[in-house]
Amino acid sequence: MKTKSLLFLFLIFSCSMVSAEALPVYQPRFGRAQPVVAVVADNEMTELTDFVVPYAVLKASGAAQVLSVATGSGVVNLYPALKMQAETTMAEFDKNYSQGADYVIVPALHNVQAAALQNWVKAQAAKGAVIVGICDGVWVLAHAGLLEQHRAVGFWYSMDSLQKQFPATTWVRNQRYLADGKIITTTGVTASLPASLALVAAIAGHERATALANELGIRNYLSTHDSQQFKMSVAHATTIAGNWLRFWSHDEIALPLSAGVNDIALALYADAWSRTYRSQVKAYASSMQAVQTRYGLQLLPDAVADASTMDRIKKEHNWLADIAPAQAMDKALQQIGKTYGQASRAMVSTFMEYPQ
């Protein structure tokens, strides 16, 4: 009897934990068959993983109409590697979706105080959209006044500055993502994975999100997080300085762009390798034309390679076609550790806020 009672209490506790972590369930609007999701990009600079992961995960779910929306026309430079062509601009989006998006996802962007960007995000919020700040995308939301009297999380590196500049917001630690009304915020870079799956659950249900998590190689998409793991240490500062000063031994990491490339794996791998301060990713293709990824992004190569070079690069990275996308992060960190040492691996992991 006692065992059954303990089991019952455990189940009740587990259920309460799931409900506490769940994002608000999507409420259909305007007779739409699926929610419209706008993933925002700043042409000058948009964080690579922050942008690609939500876009690709929601596309992979089949549960939403997902659009890449740039601040202007032309190339979008992704940081710290790769570049792309967005599907539409903010102005074009407004013409085609006058009622607004259902979800607006804001990754870390360069021009966080740009008036046009802030006004557009505020206008979408006024039309009833759920606004999602990924990593340092939270700065855009904060400057737009959307976080006043709200609870929010953010990238560990920015938290002290956010608390000082925006005291009307309650800044929360030890949660990887957090919903407060129609505002959702996340911690750093790799939190885009669990947060995106939580969005899938809000739109299409836990069963679909769990199945997709399994496909992507993710054990769960819980919001639990140990913020104390992530801080700037003397060891990290020393590693950054030492790696950067080794200018004579900086490496190029050549990655192949070809139709159907696994965009989530590519983004995580390229992002990690471009944060070592000793290496930089360069994307090669057989021409300078845009390459469509597995989930529909239009990536642009940095350079053209001849057939034999492309074959060699593809063979070196043939794992991209088969790996569970989320595992690309672990693969990159393992390789970085072997190539540059465990201090570099730990530093990269910290700055991508990747729990170890």
Image: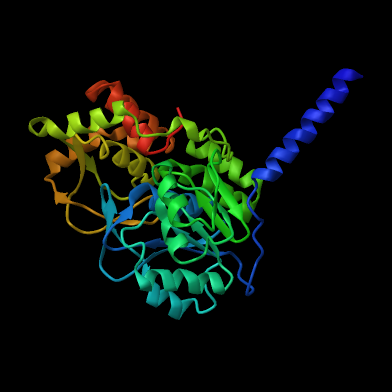
Q: Quadrant of the N terminus?
A: top right
Q: Compared with residue 332, is residue 71 higher up or lower down, i.e. above or below?
A: below
Q: Is 111 displayed left or right of 175 in the figure?
A: left
- The residue drawn where x is 31% and y is 71% is 72
Q: Quadrant of the C terminus?
A: top left
- The residue drawn where x is 26% and y is 50% is 82
Is residue 154 visible to the viewer in this orientation of the structure? yes
Q: Between residues 290 and 342, which one lies in front from this camera angle?
A: 342
Picture colour scheme: rainbow
Q: Is 174 displayed left or right of 143 in the figure?
A: right
Q: Between residues 238 and 36, which one lies in front from this camera angle?
A: 238
Q: Position of residue 34 (x, y in %)?
A: 58, 64
- The residue drawn where x is 24% and y is 28% is 238
Outermost residue, right direction? 1
Q: Compared with residue 29, is residue 199 higher up or lower down, i.e. above or below?
A: above
Q: Position of residue 120 (x, y in %)?
A: 44, 72
Q: Between residues 246 and 65, which one lies in front from this camera angle?
A: 246
Q: Position of residue 95 (x, y in %)?
A: 44, 80
Q: Between residues 206 and 232, which one lies in front from this camera angle?
A: 232
Q: Position of residue 145 (x, y in %)?
A: 49, 66
Is residue 250 visible to the viewer in this orientation of the structure? no
- The residue drawn where x is 28% and y is 71% is 73
Number of labelled discs? 0
Q: Is 154 displayed left or right of 277 in the figure?
A: right
Q: Is 319 displayed left or right of 190 in the figure?
A: left
Outermost residue, left direction? 248
